[in-house]
Image (cartoon, rainbow, N blue to C red):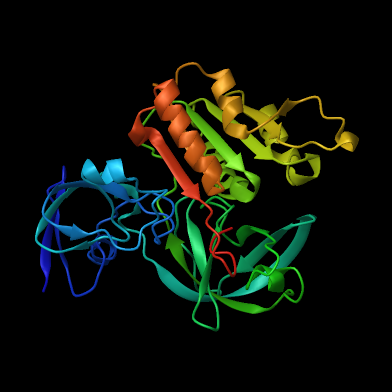
Amino acid sequence: MPHQITIQPSGHRFTVEGDETLLDAALREGFALPYGCRNGACGACKGKVVSGQLDHGAYQASTLKDEEIAQGRALFCCAKPLSDMTIEVKEIGAARDITVKTLPCRVEKLEKRADDVMLVWIKLPANERLQFLAGQYIDFQLKDGKSRSYSLANPPHDDALLELHIRHVPGGLFTDQVFSTLKERDILRLKGPLGSFFIREDSDKPMIFVAGGTGFAPIKGMLEHAFAEHTDRELVLYWGVRSLKDLYMAELPRQWMAGHPNFSFIPVLSDPEPADRWQGRTGFVHQAVLADFDDLSGYQVYACGAPVMVDSARDAFIQTRGLPEDEFFADSFVYAADAETAA
Protein backbone atom coordinates (compact mmCIF):
# COMPACT_ATOMS: atom_id res chain seq x y z
CA MET A 1 0.00 0.00 0.00
CA PRO A 2 1.20 3.59 -0.58
CA HIS A 3 2.92 5.43 2.26
CA GLN A 4 3.16 9.18 2.81
CA ILE A 5 6.63 10.52 3.53
CA THR A 6 7.37 13.95 5.00
CA ILE A 7 10.80 15.49 4.53
CA GLN A 8 12.22 17.66 7.28
CA PRO A 9 13.19 20.45 7.51
CA SER A 10 11.52 21.42 4.19
CA GLY A 11 8.09 19.96 5.01
CA HIS A 12 7.80 18.52 1.50
CA ARG A 13 5.73 15.37 1.11
CA PHE A 14 5.79 12.52 -1.36
CA THR A 15 4.19 9.11 -1.77
CA VAL A 16 6.01 5.78 -1.99
CA GLU A 17 4.19 3.36 -4.25
CA GLY A 18 4.51 -0.43 -4.36
CA ASP A 19 8.06 -1.71 -3.98
CA GLU A 20 9.79 1.65 -4.37
CA THR A 21 12.66 2.78 -2.19
CA LEU A 22 12.43 6.11 -0.40
CA LEU A 23 14.99 7.60 -2.80
CA ASP A 24 13.30 6.34 -5.96
CA ALA A 25 9.94 7.72 -4.88
CA ALA A 26 11.39 11.09 -3.87
CA LEU A 27 13.21 11.46 -7.19
CA ARG A 28 10.09 10.40 -9.12
CA GLU A 29 8.13 13.19 -7.47
CA GLY A 30 10.83 15.78 -8.15
CA PHE A 31 12.50 16.05 -4.74
CA ALA A 32 16.27 16.07 -5.12
CA LEU A 33 17.67 14.03 -2.24
CA PRO A 34 21.42 13.38 -2.17
CA TYR A 35 22.58 10.08 -3.66
CA GLY A 36 25.51 8.49 -5.44
CA CYS A 37 25.76 4.77 -6.21
CA ARG A 38 22.08 3.93 -5.52
CA ASN A 39 23.06 0.43 -4.34
CA GLY A 40 23.81 1.00 -0.66
CA ALA A 41 27.58 1.21 -0.96
CA CYS A 42 28.61 4.87 -0.98
CA GLY A 43 26.59 6.40 1.88
CA ALA A 44 25.72 9.62 0.05
CA CYS A 45 21.97 9.10 0.60
CA LYS A 46 22.23 8.52 4.36
CA GLY A 47 19.63 10.37 6.42
CA LYS A 48 17.68 10.21 9.66
CA VAL A 49 14.35 8.53 10.40
CA VAL A 50 12.34 10.88 12.62
CA SER A 51 9.25 8.69 12.85
CA GLY A 52 7.76 5.61 11.22
CA GLN A 53 8.94 2.11 10.37
CA LEU A 54 11.06 0.91 7.46
CA ASP A 55 12.87 -2.05 5.97
CA HIS A 56 16.55 -1.12 5.60
CA GLY A 57 16.91 -3.36 2.54
CA ALA A 58 20.13 -4.78 1.08
CA TYR A 59 22.60 -2.21 2.37
CA GLN A 60 26.32 -2.79 2.97
CA ALA A 61 27.24 -3.06 6.65
CA SER A 62 30.44 -1.08 6.12
CA THR A 63 28.35 1.87 4.91
CA LEU A 64 25.55 1.75 7.48
CA LYS A 65 26.86 0.58 10.84
CA ASP A 66 24.75 -0.96 13.61
CA GLU A 67 25.27 2.06 15.86
CA GLU A 68 23.98 4.34 13.08
CA ILE A 69 20.85 2.23 12.72
CA ALA A 70 20.37 2.51 16.47
CA GLN A 71 20.61 6.30 16.08
CA GLY A 72 17.83 6.24 13.47
CA ARG A 73 20.01 6.52 10.36
CA ALA A 74 19.12 4.82 7.08
CA LEU A 75 20.29 4.58 3.47
CA PHE A 76 17.35 5.93 1.51
CA CYS A 77 18.47 4.26 -1.73
CA CYS A 78 17.84 0.85 -0.12
CA ALA A 79 15.19 1.52 2.53
CA LYS A 80 11.49 0.92 1.93
CA PRO A 81 8.77 2.27 4.22
CA LEU A 82 6.53 0.00 6.24
CA SER A 83 4.35 2.90 7.42
CA ASP A 84 3.92 6.61 6.88
CA MET A 85 7.19 8.28 7.81
CA THR A 86 9.01 11.51 8.55
CA ILE A 87 12.62 11.62 7.46
CA GLU A 88 15.29 14.26 7.95
CA VAL A 89 17.57 15.01 5.03
CA LYS A 90 18.87 18.14 3.34
CA GLU A 91 17.35 18.49 -0.12
CA ILE A 92 19.46 19.63 -3.05
CA GLY A 93 17.68 22.53 -4.66
CA ALA A 94 20.26 22.93 -7.42
CA ALA A 95 19.35 19.60 -9.00
CA ARG A 96 15.60 20.08 -8.89
CA ASP A 97 15.09 21.38 -12.42
CA ILE A 98 17.51 19.04 -14.19
CA THR A 99 15.87 16.40 -16.37
CA VAL A 100 17.35 12.90 -16.49
CA LYS A 101 17.46 11.73 -20.10
CA THR A 102 18.20 8.51 -21.94
CA LEU A 103 20.01 9.29 -25.18
CA PRO A 104 22.14 7.73 -27.89
CA CYS A 105 25.69 9.05 -28.13
CA ARG A 106 28.68 8.61 -30.42
CA VAL A 107 32.30 8.04 -29.45
CA GLU A 108 34.09 11.11 -30.77
CA LYS A 109 37.65 10.57 -29.51
CA LEU A 110 39.73 8.09 -27.51
CA GLU A 111 43.04 8.93 -25.86
CA LYS A 112 45.04 6.53 -23.68
CA ARG A 113 46.70 8.61 -20.96
CA ALA A 114 48.13 5.79 -18.81
CA ASP A 115 48.42 2.02 -19.03
CA ASP A 116 45.00 1.68 -17.40
CA VAL A 117 43.36 5.05 -18.08
CA MET A 118 41.47 5.95 -21.25
CA LEU A 119 40.00 9.38 -21.87
CA VAL A 120 36.78 9.09 -23.87
CA TRP A 121 34.86 11.97 -25.42
CA ILE A 122 31.29 11.33 -26.54
CA LYS A 123 28.93 13.44 -28.61
CA LEU A 124 25.16 13.66 -28.29
CA PRO A 125 22.76 14.06 -31.23
CA ALA A 126 22.88 17.50 -32.84
CA ASN A 127 19.58 18.63 -31.31
CA GLU A 128 20.40 17.42 -27.76
CA ARG A 129 22.33 18.81 -24.80
CA LEU A 130 22.75 17.26 -21.38
CA GLN A 131 22.09 19.74 -18.60
CA PHE A 132 24.14 18.69 -15.57
CA LEU A 133 25.97 19.96 -12.55
CA ALA A 134 29.76 19.68 -12.48
CA GLY A 135 30.65 16.44 -10.71
CA GLN A 136 27.58 14.41 -11.72
CA TYR A 137 27.80 11.14 -13.64
CA ILE A 138 26.12 9.20 -16.45
CA ASP A 139 25.19 5.54 -16.84
CA PHE A 140 26.03 3.67 -20.01
CA GLN A 141 23.10 1.35 -20.81
CA LEU A 142 24.58 -1.94 -22.03
CA LYS A 143 22.90 -4.46 -24.31
CA ASP A 144 22.41 -7.06 -21.58
CA GLY A 145 20.38 -4.64 -19.48
CA LYS A 146 23.25 -3.82 -17.16
CA SER A 147 24.69 -0.34 -16.73
CA ARG A 148 28.07 1.16 -15.92
CA SER A 149 28.57 4.57 -14.31
CA TYR A 150 31.19 7.20 -15.21
CA SER A 151 31.71 10.69 -13.89
CA LEU A 152 31.59 13.66 -16.24
CA ALA A 153 35.01 15.31 -16.31
CA ASN A 154 34.01 18.42 -18.25
CA PRO A 155 32.24 21.44 -16.74
CA PRO A 156 28.67 22.26 -17.81
CA HIS A 157 29.69 25.34 -19.79
CA ASP A 158 31.96 23.22 -22.02
CA ASP A 159 29.46 20.58 -23.08
CA ALA A 160 29.89 20.19 -26.84
CA LEU A 161 31.49 16.85 -25.94
CA LEU A 162 31.15 14.86 -22.73
CA GLU A 163 34.51 13.82 -21.26
CA LEU A 164 35.01 10.61 -19.30
CA HIS A 165 38.10 9.11 -17.62
CA ILE A 166 37.78 5.32 -17.69
CA ARG A 167 40.08 3.05 -15.70
CA HIS A 168 40.61 -0.47 -17.00
CA VAL A 169 39.34 -3.15 -14.64
CA PRO A 170 40.68 -6.49 -15.96
CA GLY A 171 37.71 -8.68 -16.76
CA GLY A 172 35.40 -5.69 -16.63
CA LEU A 173 32.31 -6.11 -18.75
CA PHE A 174 32.61 -2.63 -20.23
CA THR A 175 36.20 -1.52 -19.68
CA ASP A 176 37.63 -4.56 -21.47
CA GLN A 177 35.67 -3.31 -24.48
CA VAL A 178 36.90 0.26 -24.02
CA PHE A 179 40.54 -0.86 -24.02
CA SER A 180 40.26 -3.39 -26.85
CA THR A 181 37.45 -2.94 -29.38
CA LEU A 182 35.81 0.45 -28.78
CA LYS A 183 36.55 2.87 -31.60
CA GLU A 184 35.60 6.33 -32.77
CA ARG A 185 32.07 6.67 -34.17
CA ASP A 186 30.77 3.69 -32.19
CA ILE A 187 27.25 4.28 -30.87
CA LEU A 188 26.45 3.91 -27.16
CA ARG A 189 23.43 4.74 -25.03
CA LEU A 190 23.55 6.81 -21.86
CA LYS A 191 21.28 7.89 -19.05
CA GLY A 192 21.93 10.99 -16.99
CA PRO A 193 22.83 13.17 -15.34
CA LEU A 194 22.83 11.35 -12.00
CA GLY A 195 24.27 11.83 -8.53
CA SER A 196 24.54 14.57 -5.93
CA PHE A 197 28.30 15.13 -6.03
CA PHE A 198 28.65 18.79 -6.95
CA ILE A 199 29.77 22.04 -5.37
CA ARG A 200 27.38 23.59 -2.88
CA GLU A 201 27.17 27.12 -4.18
CA ASP A 202 25.35 28.49 -1.12
CA SER A 203 28.54 28.42 0.96
CA ASP A 204 31.60 30.66 1.04
CA LYS A 205 33.76 28.12 2.90
CA PRO A 206 37.15 27.12 1.47
CA MET A 207 37.06 23.77 -0.31
CA ILE A 208 39.43 20.81 -0.15
CA PHE A 209 39.20 18.30 -2.99
CA VAL A 210 40.56 14.78 -2.42
CA ALA A 211 40.89 12.59 -5.53
CA GLY A 212 42.07 9.01 -5.77
CA GLY A 213 43.06 7.77 -9.24
CA THR A 214 40.33 8.53 -11.78
CA GLY A 215 38.42 10.20 -8.97
CA PHE A 216 40.15 13.21 -10.48
CA ALA A 217 37.53 13.19 -13.29
CA PRO A 218 34.51 14.78 -11.55
CA ILE A 219 36.76 17.02 -9.48
CA LYS A 220 38.30 18.33 -12.70
CA GLY A 221 34.82 19.34 -13.86
CA MET A 222 34.01 20.92 -10.50
CA LEU A 223 37.21 22.96 -10.43
CA GLU A 224 36.84 24.13 -14.03
CA HIS A 225 33.31 25.21 -13.17
CA ALA A 226 34.58 27.10 -10.12
CA PHE A 227 37.22 28.85 -12.23
CA ALA A 228 34.61 29.80 -14.83
CA GLU A 229 32.45 31.25 -12.05
CA HIS A 230 35.44 33.29 -10.82
CA THR A 231 35.04 32.01 -7.30
CA ASP A 232 37.24 33.61 -4.68
CA ARG A 233 36.92 30.64 -2.33
CA GLU A 234 40.17 28.87 -1.45
CA LEU A 235 40.52 25.67 -3.53
CA VAL A 236 42.98 22.92 -2.61
CA LEU A 237 43.36 19.70 -4.61
CA TYR A 238 45.04 16.59 -3.23
CA TRP A 239 45.41 13.91 -5.92
CA GLY A 240 46.57 10.51 -4.73
CA VAL A 241 47.86 7.80 -7.06
CA ARG A 242 50.29 4.91 -6.83
CA SER A 243 53.24 6.13 -8.93
CA LEU A 244 54.17 9.05 -11.15
CA LYS A 245 52.78 7.51 -14.34
CA ASP A 246 49.34 7.39 -12.73
CA LEU A 247 49.15 11.20 -12.57
CA TYR A 248 47.71 11.03 -16.03
CA MET A 249 46.86 14.75 -16.33
CA ALA A 250 49.32 16.29 -13.87
CA GLU A 251 50.09 19.16 -16.22
CA LEU A 252 46.53 20.46 -16.00
CA PRO A 253 46.33 21.31 -12.26
CA ARG A 254 49.79 22.81 -12.54
CA GLN A 255 48.43 25.12 -15.25
CA TRP A 256 45.51 25.99 -12.97
CA MET A 257 47.96 27.01 -10.24
CA ALA A 258 49.64 29.44 -12.62
CA GLY A 259 46.35 31.10 -13.51
CA HIS A 260 44.42 31.03 -10.24
CA PRO A 261 46.10 32.31 -7.05
CA ASN A 262 43.33 30.84 -4.88
CA PHE A 263 44.11 27.28 -6.11
CA SER A 264 46.84 24.91 -4.94
CA PHE A 265 47.71 21.36 -5.99
CA ILE A 266 49.34 18.64 -3.91
CA PRO A 267 50.04 15.34 -5.70
CA VAL A 268 50.60 12.34 -3.39
CA LEU A 269 52.18 9.03 -4.44
CA SER A 270 51.51 5.95 -2.31
CA ASP A 271 54.15 3.72 -3.96
CA PRO A 272 56.55 5.72 -6.16
CA GLU A 273 58.90 3.76 -8.37
CA PRO A 274 62.68 4.29 -8.16
CA ALA A 275 62.65 5.67 -11.69
CA ASP A 276 60.19 8.36 -10.59
CA ARG A 277 62.87 10.03 -8.41
CA TRP A 278 59.91 11.46 -6.53
CA GLN A 279 60.67 14.31 -4.14
CA GLY A 280 57.05 15.15 -3.33
CA ARG A 281 54.50 13.86 -0.84
CA THR A 282 54.09 10.12 -0.25
CA GLY A 283 51.63 7.90 1.60
CA PHE A 284 47.84 7.84 1.58
CA VAL A 285 46.22 10.94 0.16
CA HIS A 286 43.87 11.61 3.09
CA GLN A 287 46.84 11.48 5.47
CA ALA A 288 48.45 14.32 3.53
CA VAL A 289 45.38 16.42 4.29
CA LEU A 290 45.59 15.49 7.97
CA ALA A 291 49.25 16.52 8.03
CA ASP A 292 48.45 19.93 6.53
CA PHE A 293 45.26 20.83 8.45
CA ASP A 294 44.84 20.70 12.22
CA ASP A 295 41.29 22.08 12.06
CA LEU A 296 38.75 21.47 9.29
CA SER A 297 35.75 22.91 11.11
CA GLY A 298 35.53 25.83 8.68
CA TYR A 299 35.97 23.81 5.46
CA GLN A 300 34.03 21.79 2.94
CA VAL A 301 35.59 18.57 1.62
CA TYR A 302 34.77 16.93 -1.71
CA ALA A 303 36.25 13.42 -2.04
CA CYS A 304 36.12 10.97 -4.92
CA GLY A 305 37.79 7.62 -5.40
CA ALA A 306 37.83 4.10 -4.01
CA PRO A 307 35.53 3.38 -1.06
CA VAL A 308 38.41 2.73 1.34
CA MET A 309 39.88 6.15 0.60
CA VAL A 310 36.55 7.95 0.88
CA ASP A 311 35.60 6.16 4.10
CA SER A 312 39.02 6.74 5.68
CA ALA A 313 38.92 10.42 4.78
CA ARG A 314 35.36 10.88 6.09
CA ASP A 315 36.07 9.20 9.41
CA ALA A 316 39.41 10.92 10.01
CA PHE A 317 38.33 14.41 8.97
CA ILE A 318 35.16 14.33 11.07
CA GLN A 319 36.52 12.54 14.12
CA THR A 320 39.98 14.09 14.41
CA ARG A 321 39.80 17.43 12.61
CA GLY A 322 36.32 18.68 13.45
CA LEU A 323 34.90 18.69 9.93
CA PRO A 324 31.11 19.03 10.19
CA GLU A 325 29.48 15.80 9.02
CA ASP A 326 27.26 17.66 6.56
CA GLU A 327 30.26 19.38 4.94
CA PHE A 328 31.76 16.14 3.60
CA PHE A 329 30.58 15.33 0.08
CA ALA A 330 31.69 12.20 -1.72
CA ASP A 331 31.38 10.01 -4.77
CA SER A 332 32.62 6.51 -4.00
CA PHE A 333 33.68 4.37 -6.96
CA VAL A 334 32.22 0.94 -6.29
CA TYR A 335 33.13 -2.12 -8.34
CA ALA A 336 30.93 -5.18 -8.79
CA ALA A 337 32.37 -8.66 -8.49
CA ASP A 338 32.19 -9.40 -12.18
CA ALA A 339 32.80 -5.92 -13.53
CA GLU A 340 32.93 -2.27 -12.62
CA THR A 341 29.85 -0.31 -11.59
CA ALA A 342 31.62 3.03 -11.39
CA ALA A 343 34.78 4.51 -12.71
Q: In front here: 128 or 179?
A: 179
Relative to 74, residue 209 above or below: above
Q: Is 161 rendered above or below residue 216? A: below
Q: Residue furthest top?
A: 294
122 on left or right of 12: right
Q: Quadrant of residue 280?
A: top right
Q: Which residue reaches farthest front?
A: 66
Identify the residue shown where x is 59% and y is 47%.
215
Determine whether 9 is above or below 175 in the image.
above
Q: Nearer the viewer, residue 36 or 283?
A: 283
User: What x and y, as percent, mark residue 231?
Assistant: 49, 31
Answer yes or no: is residue 280 visible.
Answer: yes
Q: In x, y percent, where is residue 332?
A: 50, 50
State the image coordinates of residue 12 (x, y, percent, origin top left). 14, 53
Q: Quadrant of the C terminus?
A: bottom right
Residue 91 visible somewhere in the drawing: no
Residue placed furthest toward the bottom: 143
Residue ID at (63%, 73%) = 173
Q: Quadrant of the N terminus?
A: bottom left
Tell how many labels.
Answer: 0
Q: Which x, y percent locates residue 225?
A: 52, 43
Residue at horizontal 72 percent and vertical 66 percent from the top = 109
Q: Seen in the image, is 325 located left or right of residue 106?
A: left
- From the viewer's perspective, tell me whether residue 253 is left or right of residue 1: right
